[in-house]
Image: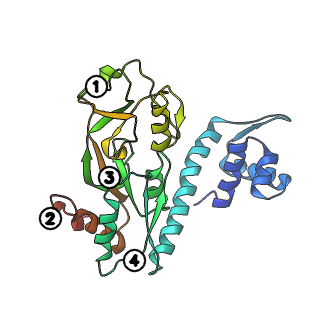
Amino acid sequence: MIELETRELEYFLAVADELHFGRAAVRLSIAQPALSKAIQRIESRLGVPLLIRSSRHVELTPAGEVLQEHGRHALNAVSAAVRRTRRAGDTRAHLRLVLKPGGDAGLLSAILAEYAHQHDAGRVDILFSGPADRSDFLRDGRADVGLLFVPLDDLDGLAHETLHTDDRVVIVPSGHRLAGHASVRMADLEGETLPRWKGVPGGGGTGPEVTDVVQLLHMITVSRMIGVLPRSLVEPLPPGLVCIPVADAPPSRLVLAWNEQDRRPTVASFVSAALRLRPEAQSGPDGPASVLEGA
């Protein structure tokens, strides 16, 4: 028996996010008394208090914190199911590819051209993401395929194939103490200021927050920080900057990823086209067709 409806979850999550019934009611476009009664009905049905209320303060109980976390996942799953169902029934639906700006290692044009040769090829819409949410685009159905970087992106729940392997480099101003080195090790970077990436848990460094590579390179140019990135993300390098291989940094892989539950022929066709461009064309039991068919 389903004890909560999606609308009720939406009501609760709005209150949990705002911790204020008035603001939550405005966000939901309903009257505040109706929202209060809806939350009371949810608590009565579940048999546990979800909120601690006072005239000036609203606070989540431990049970409320659990429902906030799992309820958000549940709503995201329902939304993804609706989007995928509609797209599965729409033969004219476009394929949506998500990537970070410049995050294709120079392969995107060739992949699109190869896919265009497929008999079932359709239009491909390009979506640009933030620093760390490409995986979310694929999991919640906003995108069908994506170009992700490993180990920077989380591949949990995603099928993937490696398209390109990059060494990692440190980018420094031309006058930096490391600029003349043929290579460096991670220990050589101790004491340096590294960026905090917006949207990345922990941020990565202690320096100013950046949202993309363009911002990072600008901050390096004015000597506010240095950065460590896959080489393909910084080529060609702007004047005044130097990139140096980091000998002991693990390589970065550019992967084509898609939701592991997505078996649509259009996705399989796009993946197959991309894999044909790899230096070593895959075949056999681990090739793209068997991966997509769940063999």
Q: Which residue is mark 3?
A: 105
Q: Amino acid at mark 1?
A: Gly
Q: Residue at x 80, y 58 (%)?
A: 30
Cα distance between the residues tagged 1 and 3: 26 Å
Instruction: State which tag comes first along the sequence, 1 or 3.
Output: 3
In the image, farthest residue toward the top: 191
Up-down: is 291 above or below 67? below
State which tag comes first along the sequence, 2 or 1: 1
Identify the element where label 3 is drawn: loop
What residue would you read off at disc 2? 283
Give whichever of discs 2 and 3 has the lower sequence position. 3
Give how far across and how far down residue 93 sits, in percent: 47, 76
Residue 122's disc is 4
Q: Earlier in the sequence, mark 4 or mark 1?
A: 4
Q: Residue beneath label 1, please?
A: 180
Between 149 and 293, the one nearer to me in the picture: 149
Residues at discs 4 and 1 in contact (Cβ within 8 Å): no
User: Of tags 4 and 1, which is closer to the observer?
Assistant: 1
Q: Amino acid at mark 4?
A: Gly
Q: Are marks 2 and 3 in contact (CB under 8 Å)?
A: no
Q: Mark 1 or mark 3, which is nearer to you?
A: 1
Q: Position of residue 119 (x, y in %)?
A: 30, 81
Of callouts 3 and 4, the N-terminal one: 3
Q: Is residue 51 above or below residue 114?
A: above
Mark 2 vs mark 3: in front:
3
Cα separation, mark 3 vs mark 4, equals: 23 Å
Whole-number angstrom distance, CA of label 4 to CA of label 1: 48 Å
Q: Are marks 2 and 1 in contact (CB under 8 Å)?
A: no
In the image, what residue type sits under mark 2? Answer: Ser
